[in-house]
C-alpha cells in the first residue's frame, strides 16, 4: 500500500473521530449510558471512574482494526485503527492530563488552545445531569469559547 494513502487515511480517521466522539458523548454518554458517565460529572473522589469504561468503546475497535488489518494485509482497516488510536492518545493528553489534570503537567499554561479547551470543558461540566449540556467535543472548541479566551487575554493586558 502507498504510504501517502495510509497516512491520509490515518489523518482523516483522526479528524472524523472528533465527530464520532461528539455524537457518542452527546447521545450515548448523556443518553442511555449516563449511569457510566455520571460519576464524571459528579465525582466520587475515586481515581478510577465508571466513565473510564468508555476507553474500551474506542480501544477495542482500534485494536481489532490494527490487528486484523495487519494480519490480513488490509492496510485501510489498519490505517483506520491507527487513526482511532492516535485520537485516543490525543484524548488522553487533552482530556485526562490537560483538562482534568489527572497528571499535574499543565496547571499554569498560558497557551490559548489549552485555555480554550479547558474553558469549553468547564462549561460542559457546569451541567451536572445528563440534560441541557453543551460543548460535547474534546479537541475542538466552538468559536464562542475562543472569543472568551481572547477577551480574557485582552482584559489582562
Image: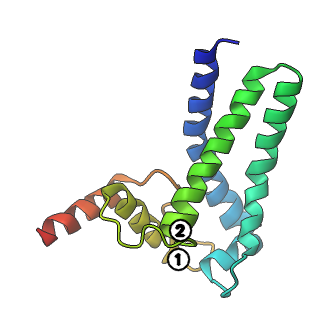
Residue at image position (84%, 34%) is 67
Q: Can residue 136 be seen by looking at this rendering?
A: no
The picture quadrant where one finds residue 3 is top right
Residue at image position (29%, 64%) is 110
Circle 1 crowding by C-alpha within 10 Å: few under 14, some 14–19, many from 20? some
Q: Give how far across and how far down residue 30 sits, in percent.
A: 66, 66
User: On the picture, is 55 further left or further right than 93?
Assistant: right
Residue at image position (89%, 22%) is 72
Q: Give how far across and how far down residue 103 sits, in percent.
A: 55, 71
Under tag 2, what secondary structure? loop
What is the image's colouring?
Answer: rainbow
Q: Nearer the viewer, residue 105 or 151?
A: 105
Q: Give how far across and how far down residue 49 sits, in percent.
A: 72, 75
Relative to 17, does residue 153 appear above or below in the rendering? Answer: below
Which is more N-terminal, label 2 or label 1?
1
Q: Nearer the viewer, residue 129 or 91?
A: 91
Quadrant including the C terminus: bottom left
Task: Name the residue at the bottom extreme.
Answer: 45
Relative to 131, does residue 65 appear above or below in the rendering? Answer: above
Give the numbered dot on residue 115. none
Under tag 1, what secondary structure? loop
Residue at image position (61%, 50%) is 89
Task: Name the residue at the front extreme.
Answer: 105
Task: Name the residue at the left extreme.
Answer: 157
Q: Give how far across and how far down residue 26 sits, in percent.
A: 62, 59
The picture quadrant where one finds residue 116 is bottom left
Q: Which residue carries the number 2 mark?
A: 133
The reply to whether the C-beta atoms of the residues labelled 1 and 2 are less than 8 Å apart is: yes
Q: Which residue carries the number 1 mark?
A: 127
How many marks do you count on the picture?
2
Circle 2 crowding by C-alpha within 10 Å: few under 14, some 14–19, many from 20? some
Amino acid at each position: 500500500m502507498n504510504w501517502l494513502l495510509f497516512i491520509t487515511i490515518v489523518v482523516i480517521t483522526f479528524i472524523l473521530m472528533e465527530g464520532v466522539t461528539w455524537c457518542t458523548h452527546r447521545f450515548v454518554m448523556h443518553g442511555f449510558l449516563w449511569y457510566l458517565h455520571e460519576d464524571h460529572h459528579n465525582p466520587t473522589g475515586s481515581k478510577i471512574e465508571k466513565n473510564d469504561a468508555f476507553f474500551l468503546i474506542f480501544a477495542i475497535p482500534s485494536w481489532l482494526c490494527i490487528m486484523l488489518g495487519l494480519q490480513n494485509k488490509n492496510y485501510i482497516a489498519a490505517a483506520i485503527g491507527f487513526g482511532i488510536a492516535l485520537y485516543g492518545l490525543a484524548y488522553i493528553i487533552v482530556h485526562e492530563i490537560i483538562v482534568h489534570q489527572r497528571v499535574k503537567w499543565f496547571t499554569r499554561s498560558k497557551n490559548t488552545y489549552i485555555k480554550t479547551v479547558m474553558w469549553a470543558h468547564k462549561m460542559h461540566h457546569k451541567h451536572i445531569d445528563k440534560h441541557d449540556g453543551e460543548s460535547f467535543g474534546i479537541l475542538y472548541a466552538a468559536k464562542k469559547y475562543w472569543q472568551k479566551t481572547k477577551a480574557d487575554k485582552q482584559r489582562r493586558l
